[in-house]
Image: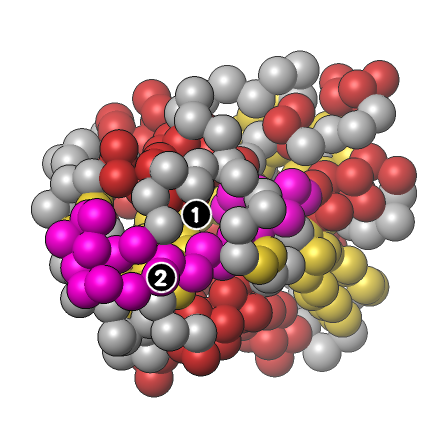
């Protein structure tokens, strides 16, 4: 197991009554090879985490190109939406930033859900480019989002109002933010505004002076790399290397959740997302491949 694997495996291990799987297959290596060489057909529907959505969409495009009889549809809506839609049978896969038990409304269905880890992801504190702050401590972040600190001058910046942009309760990114950074401090939802997706957060922070929020690193790669100002936390940057060294705290697994063990085309799609053939794309898109987490 690599250093990343040792750290990430220990940090988000539990997931209530839901079954948790580091691997998307339960058969032998021979069965994996047979399935990999068989063309996938049918329809796969997925919904949930907007942090995972870009990766799922790219995986859908790639797997459909080599499996013309397969249709994969990916939607957002937040981790809570994904978990509860798969539990109700509305979709085949619920994408989530947190284990299903954290968002499941009908707890009687917990034993049926299977949580499969498909990637890791770091999250970043982001601010509008006009903000003259480079790093925040965890305590300063808690004070800002709980409403104790409302001006950037109180955390080393200019005399400027802090405009908080938050996420709704259904967001898995928010759940990760609360558990890792806010801890016992309570978010003041009366502050600022709330945006229901990572994409909306990016646009809102970009257009709102003095704004701050939190965003999946997958939205800060490629042509969006410099769209927002990324803050350090405790003077540490949100990189894979710093996550591996246990220096950067704000990260999570990404899960694909199914009602029972995944089968057929659903299994094939999940296997592809977490597999070696897609790993380079996973890394380029700002995620951590599962091959680095074992």
Where in the figure is residue 122, as x and y percent of width and height?
A: 34, 49
| Residue at 37 percent of width and 38 percent of height | 148
Name the residue that disc number 1 marks: 119
Residue 187: which disc? none
Residue 161: which disc? 2
| Residue at 35 percent of width and 25 percent of height | 11
Q: Residue 233 lies in what quarter of the image? A: top left
On screen, residue 18 above or below 289: above
**Range drawn in magenta:** 151-174
Identify which residue, 80 or 115, lies in the foreground: 80
Q: Secondary structure at mark 1?
A: strand
Q: Residue 229 lies in what quarter of the image? A: bottom left
Where in the figure is residue 84, as x and y percent of width and height?
A: 79, 39
Q: How many marks?
A: 2
Within 10 Å of the Cα at label 2, are there few (<14), some (14-19), or many (20+) other Cα atoms? some
Assign the C terminus to one quadrant of the image.
Answer: top left
On screen, residue 97 above or below 156: above
Evaluate whether residue 227 shows in this view: yes
Q: Secondary structure at mark 2?
A: loop
Where in the figure is residue 177, as x and y percent of width and height?
A: 44, 39
Query: Does residue 169 show up magenta in the picture?
Result: yes
On screen, residue 230 above or below 268: below
Q: Are marks 2 and 1 in contact (CB under 8 Å)?
A: no
Of label 2 and label 1, which has the lower sequence position? 1
| Residue at 75 percent of width and 21 percent of height | 110
Within 10 Å of the Cα at label 1, are there few (<14), some (14-19), or many (20+) other Cα atoms? many
């Amino acid at each position: 197991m690599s250093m990343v694997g040792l750290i990430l495996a220990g940090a988000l291990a539990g997931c209530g009554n839901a079954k948790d799987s580091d691997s998307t297959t339960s058969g032998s290596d021979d069965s994996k090879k047979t399935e990999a060489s068989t063309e996938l057909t049918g329809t796969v529907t997925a919904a949930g985490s907007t942090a995972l959505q870009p990766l799922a969409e790219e995986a859908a495009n790639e797997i459909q190109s080599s499996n013309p009889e397969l249709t994969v549809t990916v939607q957002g809506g937040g981790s809570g939406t994904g978990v509860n839609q798969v539990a109700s049978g509305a979709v085949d896969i619920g994408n989530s930033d947190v284990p299903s038990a954290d968002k499941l409304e009908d707890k009687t269905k917990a034993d049926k859900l299977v949580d499969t880890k498909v990637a890791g992801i770091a999250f970043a504190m982001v601010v509008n480019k006009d903000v003259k702050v480079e790093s925040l401590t965890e305590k300063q972040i808690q004070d800002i989002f709980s409403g104790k600190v409302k001006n950037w001058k109180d955390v080393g910046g200019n005399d400027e109002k802090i405009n908080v942009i938050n996420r709704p309760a259904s967001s898995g990114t928010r759940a990760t933010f609360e558990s890792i950074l806010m801890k016992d401090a309570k978010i003041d939802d009366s502050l600022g505004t709330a945006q229901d997706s990572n994409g909306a957060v990016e646009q809102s922070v970009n257009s709102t002076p003095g704004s701050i929020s939190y965003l999946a690193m997958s939205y800060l790669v490629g042509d969006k790399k410099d769209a927002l100002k990324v803050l350090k936390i405790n003077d540490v940057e949100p990189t894979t290397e710093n996550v591996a060294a246990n220096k950067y705290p704000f990260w999570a697994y990404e899960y694909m959740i199914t009602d029972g063990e995944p089968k057929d085309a659903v299994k094939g799609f999940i296997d592809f997302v977490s597999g070696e053939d897609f790993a380079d794309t996973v890394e380029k898109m700002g995620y951590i491949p599962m091959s680095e987490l074992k």
